[in-house]
Image (tube, rainbow, N blue to C red):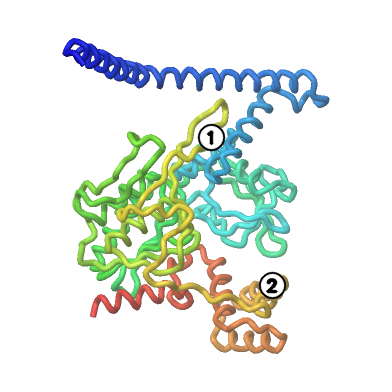
Amino acid sequence: MSNNEKKCKERILLIGITSFFIVLLILLAFSPTVLAQNKDAELEEQISLFHDVVEFIKDNYVDEDKAKVELLIQGALKGMLESLDDPYSMYLSEDDMTDMEETTIGRFGGVGLYILKGEKGVDVARPIEGSPAYRAGIVTGDIIIAVEGESTLDLTIDEVVKRLKGPEGTKVTMTILRGESKTFDITVERAMIELPTVQKDMINNKYGYMEILQFTPLTQQRVEEAIEYFIENKYKGLVIDVRSNPGGLLSSVIDISDYFFSPGDVIVSTKSRDIFDDRVYRAKDEPIVDKNIPIVVLIDKYTASAAEILTGALKDTGRAYAIGEKSYGKGSVQQVRYAGKGGFRLTVAKYYTPGDISIDGIGIMPDQEVKEEKLSREEEESMDKLLENNEIEEFVKKYPEPTKNQINSFLKKLKKAGIVLRERYILKMIRNEINKKNNNPPVYDLDYDLVLIEAVKYLDTKNK
């Protein structure tokens, strides 16, 4: 082969390679646009199909009132989010959005009562301490039989709640039934009610006990106040109880976690579909809980979401010892968006503990598993019988502050009647019924709470 032919072939090869890379670069440069255009075309095609179906239903469905465009769109949005098969992604009605905002904020205008649907109306489970209802003298056991003259018998609990809520400074009149026959009206001026988020107390004058009920914008301040209270009382250990805590705001739990870690320590990370949206949350300030203070976290199968973030951070880093049972396993992050008068909630990421562990659908295992023993079939039947016959309630009604002898006589009576429930459970039921009548029940139960009892034992070993 001549030199000219050789050079010609090399030139052709070089041109070919160059052309290949040019084409490749063009494809790389324009393929996202092409893909996006294809996706837009597909979306437009499907929206057009949706539009045609809505139009046909609107014009032809036999019941015109049910074929209004707004109702059809709401139904479609609900179905679209349900199709994701994600229990945390859902359409939210206007009322749902309002309720969620109030729960998230932790404050609303109202009278300050925990209420339950009862046979004669609406039972007062407990007034919130310091609320208008509390100051007006409404007590646990009162029955609201009417609101503004309207009977509560045929109203749902949600309908009663809506009538009791209202702007701060406005008034509402409730008709109260107290005891068997005494009825009277109470007019209460509504105020801003803060849902309790933290309960605190000292255990044996040594250990701080802090129950976090939920994570709202107000929780951080309440946690800080609790820690300051423990410091003032020279606490030697801390119990953080997040059992039955359903979670709440990510920002709230991150701010609270900051109290336990040094600057730079990882609290939690979130990973989403887009890698550029991934985030790592770290402690910013010096901790206010001394690193030498032993901590125990109490968890159960209802500990979820933000409560699991706090638990995971404390447990993964060895900062706390977890006692109880495996947590719920909600390791996903949701965003809430408005859509018309309503809105929707969508899962956008999953969170990971400092050990880079996703607990979504798995939960967090405690360091020490402690839970109530399951009742036998006979014990369950005895429990149902006690509740159906209101025997515990009647006993406490007769003896509001029962003596040891009165309780022992009651236990013998139940045993003679065929009740086979373990004594400990009956005593706990009596205690709970007594506390229902108490406007300021104890914050913790060191007699019958097995998990808390083990937590105190653990702290005792750390303080020897």
Q: Position of residue 407 (x, y in %)?
A: 59, 84
Q: Secondary structure at mark 1?
A: strand
Q: Position of residue 231 (x, y in %)?
A: 24, 63
Per the model, the C-alpha gap separating discs 1 and 2 is 40 Å
Q: Relative to residue 388, is residue 414 depicted above or below?
A: below
Residue 55 appearing in the image = yes
**Residue behind mark 1:** 344
In the picture, measured across the screen, residue 261 lies left or right of residue 130, that is: left
Above or below residue 193? Residue 230 is: below
Amino acid type, label 1: Phe
Which of the two discs, 1 and 2, labels the residue nearer the N terminus? 1
Q: Identify residue type, mark 2.
A: Asp
Crowding around mark 2 (Cα neighbors within 10 Å: few <14, some 14 to 19, many 20+) is few
151 or 186: nearer the eye? 151
> What is the quadrant of residue 126 in the picture?
bottom right
Residue wearing tag 2: 384
The quadrant of the rendering that contains the N terminus is: top left
**Camera-nearest residue between 12 and 2:** 2
Q: Is residue 378 above or below residue 435?
A: below
Residue drawn 37% across the image and 73% down it: 455
- Looking at the rendering, which quadrant does residue 22 occupy? top left
